[in-house]
Image: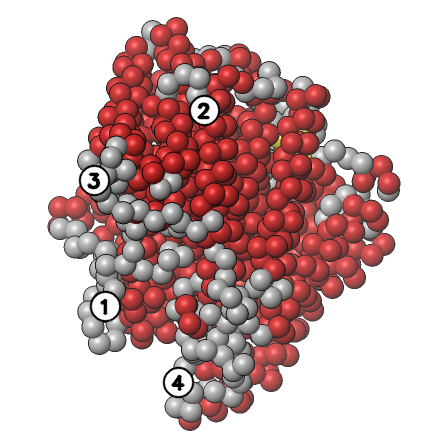
Amino acid sequence: MTAGIAVDIGLAALVAAMALWTILVRDAYAAVIGFIGYGLLLALVWVRLDAVDVALTEAAIGGGVTGVLLLRAVGALHRGAAPLEDGPPPGPATRRIAALACAAVAAGLAFVVLGVSGPAPTLAPLAAEHLPATGLKNPVTGVLLAFRALDTLLEKVVLLLALIGIWSLSPDGAWGGRPTLGRPGRASDTLRFLAQLLPPVGIVVGIHVLWVGANAPGGAFQGGAVLAAMWILAMMAGLSPVPAIGRPWLRAALVIGPLAFLAVGVAGIFIADGFLAYPPAFAKPLILAIEAAITLSIAVTLAMMVAGPPQRPGAP
Amino acid sequence: MPAAALDPGLLLVLAVMLPATGAVAALALPGRWAGRIAFGLWPLGLAVAVAVAWTVWAAGAPLHYAVGGWAPPLGLMLRADGPSALMLLVAAIVIGAAGLYARADLRPEPGATESRAAVVFWTLLMALWSALNAVALGGDLFNLYVALELLTFSAIPLVCLGGSAKTLQAALRYLVFALVGSVLYLLGTALLYGAYGTLDIVLLSGRAGPEPAAILACALMIAGLAAKTALFPLHLWLPPAHAGAPPAASAVLSGLVVKASFFLIVRLWFDVMPGLSTAAAANLIGALGAGAILAGSVMALRQARLKLMIAYSTVAQIGYLFLMVPLLFGVPQAEIAANAAWSGGWLQLASHALAKAAMFLAAGLIAEAAGHDRIHGLDGVGRAVPVAVLAFTLAGLSLVGLPPSGGFAAKWLLLSAAVATGQWWWAVVMILGGLLAAFYLFPVIGRAYADGTAAFARPRDARSREFVVLALAVAAALLGLSQLYPPGLLRIGLGSGLAGAGVP
Amino acid sequence: MTMTVFGLCGAALVGIGLYGLIVQAQPLRRILAFNLLGGGVFLLFGVIARRGAVEGLGSDPVPQAMVITGIVVAFSATALAISLVVRLKETGRGDDEGSA
C-alpha cells in the first residue's frame, strides 16, 4: 500500500512538473515535447485511478495523435520567421497577479473536490444494474453507446464539423484537393522503416481494442485512434498517398459511423422503446455494428484532421 | 412498439437530429447538394419548431423525452419549456432568413462543381441550427456541454469564411474565448457531479444547496458562459468576429449564437441554483450588463465602419438581457415566470435576434451597393437599395426601443420591473442606452436617405434579398404588438411546471 | 490517499493551465495551456469517478465516459486551432489588409 502511494505521489509530482515545464520553458519545441510527456504520464495516472478505458484514450489521442499534430505545428510555426504573437507578453506585475489568482482557483478546487464528506454520490450501481440490458460487459461502453448515446452521437458530429472547419481554411483553389503530410519522397529511412513495420501490428491492435471493448476496456475511440495513428505514419512516410478531400470513398468513410449510429437510433423508435433504444435481444450485435462503423469514421477523421487543410489541387 | 412512435416527445429528437443529419449528409454528397439539403430541411425544421411550441402551449406543461428510454440520472432527458420553444422558433426564422439571403450570395460560379465557401456555409449552417436546438432542449449539463461545442465548431469557421488575415485573427481570438469558456463550464459540471451524482437540471434543482461545491461550480460555469456570450468586459472578441464574417453568417452569429450561452446562464441561475443566488452576485451580473449597455453603445458611437458599429451594438443589447437577473432577484421561484422582467428579458432576446439579423443583412446589401462600409461614404445609398435601408430603419426602431417594436415592449417591461422593485438605477441605464442607440443609428439612416454624389451599384439578386431582410425587420418591428403570442407560453418554465416532467 | 494525491494534481493542473493561458502570447503556447487545463479538468472527473467506486466496479463509469467524450472534443479543438494558426501565419505575410 505504501509503495503504491509513493508511486502515486511521484507520478503526480512528475505530471505537475511536466505541466510547469510546458508553460515556462522558453523554446516552443521543448514545450511540445514536455506536453507529449505530460500526456503519456497522464495515461499512467488513469490506470492508477482504475479507469483503463480513459487511459487507453489518453495514450492514443492525448499523447499519440495530438503529439504528431503538435510536432507538425511547431515545425510549421516556429521555422524561419518570428512566431505570431497576439499582443505583447504581460509584464512581471501581471504575471504575479495571474499566478496568485490561478493558485487561488486551484486551492478552491482542491478544497471543494477533497472536502466532500460522507458517501460519494455515484451512478455506478445504476449503471451496473442496467448493463445486462445492453448485452455488454464493459460499463463504460454501455454509458457511451446506450445510456448516454446522444452525447456520443452529437460528439461524432462535432468531430466531422471540426474537420470541415479545418478544410474551410484551405486556399480557394485547393478546395477538393490534397492535404500535404510530410514531404513526399523525402521521408527519412527510419520513418519509412517504422511505417512498414508498425501498421500491420497497429491495425491488429486497433481492431483488437475495438473488439474487446464490449467486454473489457477498449472500444471505438481507442481503436479508431490507433488505426488513425497507423495511417498517419504510412502517409507521412509516403507509403500511402494522402487522399484528396473530395474523394467519394473518403467522404463515405467519414460519414458511415454517424449515419449507422443514426440509422440504428431511428430504427429504435420502431423496434424498441424509442430513439437510440435497442431491442434487448439484438442490443449487443447492434452496438458492435455501430462501434465498428464509428471506429472507421474516427480513424479517418482523426487522420485527416492531423493532415490539415488541402494545400494543392488533387488529381482529377 | 407502435405507441412509442406517437410520442410527441419525438419532436424534440427531430428538432436536434434533422439539421444534424442534413449536415452529415451534406458532407457525404457532392458539394452542390449542401444548399439543396438545407433548403429541403428548412420547412421541416420550422414545422417541428412550431409543433413543439404548439404542443407545449396546448398542454400548458413542458414536453420531455428520455433518449433511448433511459431516464435520468443514468440517461439523458430532452425537455422543452416556454423559453425553449421561443428559442426554437427564433432560431428557425433567423436561420431561414440567413439561408435565403446567402443563396444569392454564395451561388457557385458557372462550371464549378463545388465552391469552398458554399459547401462550408451550408453544412455549418445546418450544424449550427442543430446545436442551437440542442442547447434549447438539453436537460443534462454534460449533454449541453457537447451541444455548446457543436455550436462553437460550427460558428468559428463562419467567421473566417472570407479567408483574409484579419478574419482569421478574429476567428482565432473567438476560438480562444469560446474554448476557455467551455472548459470552465466543464469544470463546473465535474464539481456538480462530484457533489450530487447527477447532471440532470431538474434533479439538480432538487438536490443542490448552498454548499461550496455548488457555489464554485456555478460561478465557474457562469463565468465561462459569459465569455461565450461576450458579456462586458469579456466582449473584446465579438466586434471583429461579427463584423468580419459574411453578412448571412454575421446575422446568425449576432442574432442567435451569443443567445445560446445566455440561455444556459438563465437555466443555471433560475433552474439549477435558485436557492444559491445572493444579492451581491445578482447585482454584479446586473452591473456587468449595465456596463455592457454603456460601453457597447459608446464604442458603437465611435465606429467609422457600419458593420463594426452594428457589432458593438450587439455588445450593448446583450447587456439588457442580463438585467433580468437583478430585476428578478428575490422573486419567489413560483412567481418568476409571471414577472414582467421575465417576459421582458425573453422578448428582448427574440426581438434583438430578429432586428440584429435584419440589420446585418441590410448592412450587407448596403456595403455591396457602396463597395465599402465606411459610414461617412454612404450618403444617398438609399437610392440604390431603398428596401434594405427601410429594413435597416425598422430594425433600428427595435434597437432604440420605439413603439410598436419588440425592443420597445421588451425595454418597457424591464423598465416597469425596475420601477416596481425600486431599482431605478437600472432604469436610468436602460434609458441612456436607448438614447445612445438613437445617436449611433439615426445619423446612418439620415445619410442613407440624404442626397449624395457617390455612384452606387445595385447588387445582383438585390430584390429577393431585400424582401427577406424587410420581412425580418417588419417581424422585429411588430413583435411588440404580439406581447408574445400565444399568451402564457413563456410562463411554462422548468422551474414552475417541471416537478413531474419525467422525473420521479 | 490516491484520490487526494491526484485530486491535488488535477487542481494544480487547472491552475497551471489557466496561468499559461493568461501569460502566454504565442497562439501555439496558448493551445498547449488550454490542453493542460483540460487535462486537469478531466483528472478531477477521474478522481470523482474513482471515489464513486462500488463493489465490482473500480470507478464510476459515467464520468469516465464523459472524459472520453471530452478528450475527443479537446483534440478536435486543438486540431482546428492549430490549422487556424498555421493558416494565419501563411496569410499574415501578404494580404494583411483583407476585405473587412
Q: CA distance from mark 1 to mark 2?
A: 45 Å
Do callouts 3 and 2 mark residues in contact (Cβ within 8 Å)? Answer: no
Residue B371 on image: x %, y %: 30, 51
Disc 2 residue type (three-letter): Ala
A118 displayed left or right of B386: right
Dot 3: few (<14), some (14–19), or many (≥20) neighbours within 10 Å? few
Circle 1 is placed at which residue position? C93
Q: Quadrant of the N terminus of chain B?
A: top right
From the image, state whether disc 1 or disc 2 is nearer to you.
2
Do callouts 2 and 4 mark residues in contact (Cβ within 8 Å)? Answer: no
Specify the label residue B376 is tagged with. 3
Specify the label residue A183 is tagged with. 4
A302 displayed left or right of B56: left
Tell which subunit mark 4 falls on: A
Circle 2 is placed at which residue position? B477
Residue A167 on image: x %, y %: 46, 65
Residue B181 on image: x %, y %: 39, 44
Dot 4: few (<14), some (14–19), or many (≥20) neighbours within 10 Å? few
